[in-house]
Structures are given as structure tokens and as C-alpha cells.
Image: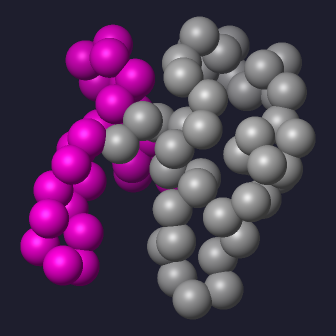
Amino acid sequence: MKRFCMNRHSGGMTNLAFVDWTVRKVGLKELWTLKWYRDSNTAGPWTTAGLVQPSDWPQWMRRLKDY
């Protein structure tokens, strides 16, 4: 995630290109809910479905929108 999870412009979003050639803004915490590969867990421990708590995130990410 180090390559993608950077708050470069203080907006809490990044542009992501998908395999179907679409591009859209994605929230930094939303990165953990995407299907990166066939067996990726979209309800993993770093999602609201996985019961992540705001205090679990690094300090700089705590104010960002949850997904």
C-alpha cells in the first residue's frame, strides 16, 4: 500500500486506474476495500466491516473518511 496510500494533496484521495480503463478518485481508506486480486478480503481488518477503530489508523489518517 505504500505506493498508493499517500496523502499527496491533503484531500485524502488518490486517482486510481482500473483494468477496465476507468479512472476515478478513491479515498485512501477505501484502498483496503478494493478487490486487488482474486482472494483479497474486501471486509478485512482495515475496513468498517472488519471493525477497524479510528485509533487503529496512523495519526495522519484518522481524520479521513471511513469506508
The answer to whether 41 appears left or right of 64 in the picture is right
Q: In front here: 47 or 7? A: 47
The verdict on residue 8 being magenta is yes
Residue at the outermost left position:
21
Number of marks drawn: 0
Compared with residue 1, is residue 22 higher up or lower down, i.e. above or below? below
Q: In this rendering, would 36 be left or right of 42?
A: left
- Part of the protein shown in magenta: 1-25
Task: Tell whether 9 sits left or right of 63.
Answer: left
Return the x and y of residue 34 as percentages of the image width and height. 51, 62
Quarter of image, res 64: top right
Q: Residue at x 11, y 73 (%)?
A: 21
The colour scheme applied to this rendered structure is one colour
Residue at screen point 88% across, 41% down: 51
Which quadrant of the view contains residue 40? bottom right
Q: Position of residue 23 (x, y in %)?
A: 15, 56
Image location of residue 37, percent across then percent down: 52, 82
Residue placed farthest to the bottom in the image?
38
Give the quarter of the figure containing the C terminus: top right
Residue 63 falls left or right of residue 50? left
The dominant secondary structure in magenta is: loop
